[in-house]
Amino acid sequence: MSSRRPVEAEEEPGVRKAAVALIFRVGADRSPELLFIKRADYPGDPWSGQVAFPGGREEAGDASLQETATRETREETGIDLTREGMVIGVLDDLRPRTVRLPAVVVRPFVAVLERSEPLRLSSEVALAFWIPFGTLAHKEAWSEDTVFARGVQINARVFRHEDHVIWGMTERILAQLLELL
């Protein structure tokens, strides 16, 4: 995965950049787990309350989008990828599929934790949880379903884990990862 060249979106005026981190760790049963967060509810936030990967928008002081993903992960979860893990790959850039969402290009980075410290969640994150990767990789775990976002009913491909629903851009990022592994 480290040698793979991702498809990068072309620069466009008015389109912000963001980055997320798909973070793996070794679970208690020695199998890989992937970290997800549930965003806190904030009025006006189009991704409020949704399941996502840690990450956010590029800031002026970020030297690269990988640094954006690392900084945002540290701010949201307390995980310092520069000390506790390493980035092992990059997926293709993605954009929201609807014009109702902000104009943003998201670059997903794949990382592995070398050691797992307790999470320290920021106020931007309602909760965090790990899902065994083997569970995500089973095609029968995925389905087409109806979700509601900002008062709009949407038919989407989803993965359900306990009372959490993975869909939208998070599902698209995860689908990319599953295709590569």
Image (cartoon, rainbow, N blue to C red):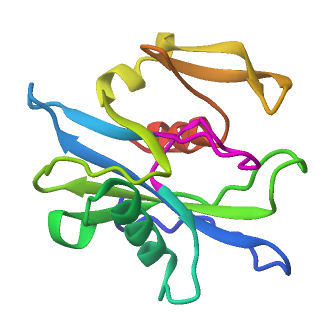
Identity of the residue drawn at 72% across and 45% down: 43
* Magenta span includes 138: no
Q: Which image quadrant: the C terminus?
A: top left
Count the marks: how many? 0
Write the residue at 40% across / 25% down.
137
> Residue at the location (33% across, 38% down)?
34
**Is residue 41 a member of the stretch shown in magenta?**
yes
Residue 8 visible to the viewer: no
Q: Position of residue 164 (x, y in %)?
A: 50, 21
Left or right side of 99 for 22:
left
Pinpoint residue 5: horizontal percent, then vertical percent: 50, 68
Given residues 169 and 2, the one toward you in this image is 169
Q: Residue furthest right?
A: 99
110 with respect to 27 (left or right): right
Left or right for 148, reference 68: right
159 vs 150: above or below: above
Q: In the rendered image of this protein, does residue 12 appear above or below residue 124?
A: below
Instruction: Residue 148: name its quadrant.
Output: top right
Question: Can the viewer see residue 45 in this picture?
Answer: yes
Quadrant hosting residue 50: top right
Question: Which stretch did the figure color magenta?
Answer: 38-54
What percent of the width, then of the height, locates residue 129?
33, 33
Report the magenta stretch's main SS: loop
Residue 31 vertical placement versus 96 (above, below): above
Front residue of this view, candidates 8 and 46: 46
Task: Give the position of the N terminus as an image quadrant.
Answer: bottom left
* Image coordinates for residue 62, horizontal then vertical, percent: 49, 85
Q: Residue at x 79, y 72 (%)?
A: 15
